[in-house]
Amino acid sequence: MKKILYSALLAGLALLSGCTKDANQIYMSTNPEKPVLQLPENGEAYIISEATGENNIAFKWSDADFGAPTEITYKLQADKDGGDFSSPIELGETTNNFISLKSSALNGLLIRADFEAELPVIVLIRVTASVSSNIAALASEVIETSFSLYKLADPNDDGSRIYMVGGAVPAGWNPGDAVEMVNIAPNVYRATTTFAVDRFRFLGQKDWDPIKYIFPDFTGNVDSNFENARQADREDGDENLWFKGTPGEYTITIDLNSKSIILDAAHTDDNSRIYIVGAGVPDAGWDPGKAVEMVNIAPNVYQAITEFAIDRFRFLGQKDWDPIKYNFPFFSGGVSSNLENALQDDREDGDENLWFKGTTGKHIITVDLGNKTVIIY
């Protein structure tokens, strides 16, 4: 027994003495092979649009070799032109030598990392390989790619989607018609749709596989209007979700982080409107008859998507100057950082309109008259 232990110890010391040290880390071989990116090719250009959001973009690389058979974890990373990957954008992780990313998801990752939309931008790509925190990771050579991205109406939307299918929702059991749930925060999805007393499930794509979520997957707080569809009075071997509430329109939110489901009666547009007018909204200018309409999306909350220019504007309660109007001092609850009072030392504005000082172009604007806030993003 002593002989066996001694031989094993010598073998271990021999292995360590033959390793290359690097900042207190070691390689398992003096000649490790880095992964080499094969797809995309250096200099390749992509155009991503909302219309192509469901398309996949493939990334592929050669296997790394640490000098010993072991499972390798690869990370696909991006950085801006001139970056050194000290704070890389993580695009994905896998033990395979490829990753396929949905165009909309990649668009969301890059837009939220402050890449500009609607013009070609240089994106640096590399892949790293690692087997342990004690062994130095290997990084491929960096390649340059060009991406034309599209703006997100909601900056929290990463482009990923969840879908609902089943007898309880308008889609029925056809995944091609599945009800789309929009990403509103990391791993949180929301949709407004009608529910009937019946079963349904969630899908990660408009197809049955590979991703699906059924009732047992939601171990957090689940709204009382839902239960496991597998009950004594009905057959459901798949354990789908069963809607047992009052049929009608609802807003459903699922949180894959907390594995919870929230259900709210959907807000119905009460048909009230407010309007935007001024040089800051070029589609309207100062003609109240052409004012941009803001639609009621919740009690006292209004929203619109329109072009903004660096200039002043105000809100009206009608397509006329009187009787209802809202200027900057009204919004005591707060405004977003791309807005300020138009009354400044370097410009005359005795009406104290709102001044847009952000990036010109199309933005989504939300006005909450109850809380007296304005957000433009």
Image: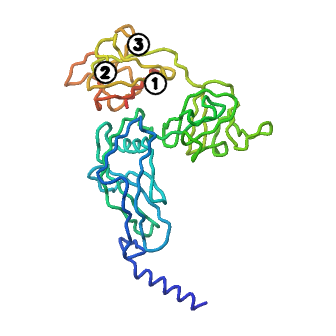
Q: Where is residue 349 in the image (x, y as percent from the top left)?
A: 24, 18
Task: Residue 128: tell me if it is visible.
Answer: yes
User: In the figure, residue 49 lies in which quadrant?
Assistant: top left
Q: Which residue is drawn at 45% across and 44% down?
A: 102
Q: Is mark 2 on a helix, strand or loop?
A: loop
Please name the residue shown 73% across and 44% down the image. 237
Q: Which of the marked residues, 3 or 2, is nearer the chain's N terminus?
A: 2
Check disc 1: other Cα within 10 Å, few if <14, some if 14-19, many if 20+. few
> Where's residue 368, x and y in %?
44, 23
Kindly report the distance in space between the C-alpha atoms of the residues bearing marks 1 and 2. 23 Å
State the residue lying farthest toward the left.
Answer: 346
Amino acid at the residue labelled 2: Val
Question: Is residue 298 found left or right of 116 in the rendered image?
Answer: right
Image position of 275 with respect to 133: above or below: above
Label 3, secondary structure: give it: loop
Instruction: Where is residue 32? Give x, y as percent.
Output: 38, 71
**In the rendering, which numbered label is found on residue 281?**
2
Say which residue label 1 marks: 371
As drawn, the label of residue 298 is: none
Q: What element carries label 1?
A: loop
Extreme bottom residue here? 3
Question: In the figure, 261 relative to 266: above or below?
Answer: below
User: What residue sits right under mark 3 in the picture?
Assistant: 317
